[in-house]
Image (cartoon, grey):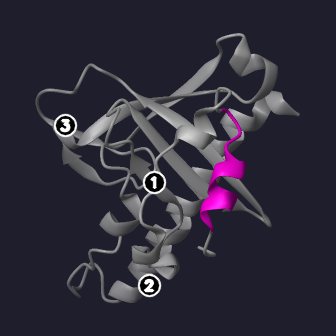
Amino acid sequence: MKAMTEAEIRASLVNAVPGEAERMPVPGLHEVVWDDREYLGWRDPGALQRGYLVYWNGAEPVGIALRASEVRLRAGSAICSLCNTPQPAGQVTMFSAARAGEAGRAGNSVGTYICADLACSLLIRIAPAASEWMPQPAATLAERAAGLAARVRTFGGRVLESAA
C-alpha cells in the first residue's frame, strides 16, 4: 500500500457524516509499515463501535467509516470476509457502512464480517510453514495479499455503488 498522510486519510472518507472526518482519531502513521498493508484499518478508542478502513483505489484513496455491531458472535468459529481467515467467533465482527452519497443519507448501508481489530493485513502475513501442501510460503502470502486487496476493493465498491 502506498503511504498516506493524515490529510489524505481525512479527505478520503466517502460516507462520513458532517464533521466526522475532523473528529476521527487517526492512528500513529509513523508506526505503519505501508508495504505490509492492503488497507489501513483501525477502531476508534473513544467509541468502540466506530472503525475506519482506508485503501487505494487506483490513484484515489477511499476511506470508509464503519460501525461495529453491538451483538457479538458467541461460540464456534467464523471467517472474516476480507482476509478469509477462520478465527474464534469473538474475533470476527459484523461491520456496516453507510453507502456513499444520497443512498447513505437515506439510510442505506452494506455490511460484512471483518476481523474485529481490522488487522487483516497483519493476520495474512503469518507465514505458513513449508509443507507438501504449501511448498512455497512466499507464494501463499502473495496470493493472500492479492485476495485481500481484491475483496477490500469489492467491499469499497459496494459502499460507493450509489455514489455514481
Across and down, in percent, residue 148 comes to 50, 60
Q: Is residue 107 left or right of residue 45?
A: right
Q: Badge 2, how many Cα within 10 Å: few under 14, some, many 20+?
A: few
Q: Which residue is mark 1?
A: 41
Q: Are marks 3 and 1 in contact (CB under 8 Å)?
A: no
Q: Which mark is residue 117?
A: none
Q: CA distance from mark 2 to mark 1?
A: 24 Å
At x 29%, y 20%, the residue is 70
Front tag of 3 and 1: 1
Q: Amino acid at mark 2?
A: Ala
Identify the secondary structure beneath mark 1. strand
Across and down, in percent, residue 76 comes to 12, 34
Identify the secondary structure beneath mark 2. helix
Identify the secondary structure beneath mark 3. helix
Q: Amino acid at mark 3?
A: Ala
Q: Which residue is mark 2?
A: 139
Q: Which residue is mark 3?
A: 89
Q: Badge 1, how many Cα within 10 Å: few under 14, some, many 20+?
A: many
Q: Which residues are magenta?
A: 5-15
Q: Earlier in the sequence, mark 2 or mark 1?
A: 1
> Up-down: is 5 above or below 51?
below
Towards the viewer: 109 or 43? 43
Q: Earlier in the sequence, mark 3 or mark 2?
A: 3
Front tag of 3 and 2: 3
Quadrant of the image containing the N terminus: bottom right
Q: Badge 3, how many Cα within 10 Å: few under 14, some, many 20+?
A: some
At x 72%, y 16%, the residue is 105
Q: Amino acid at mark 1?
A: Gly
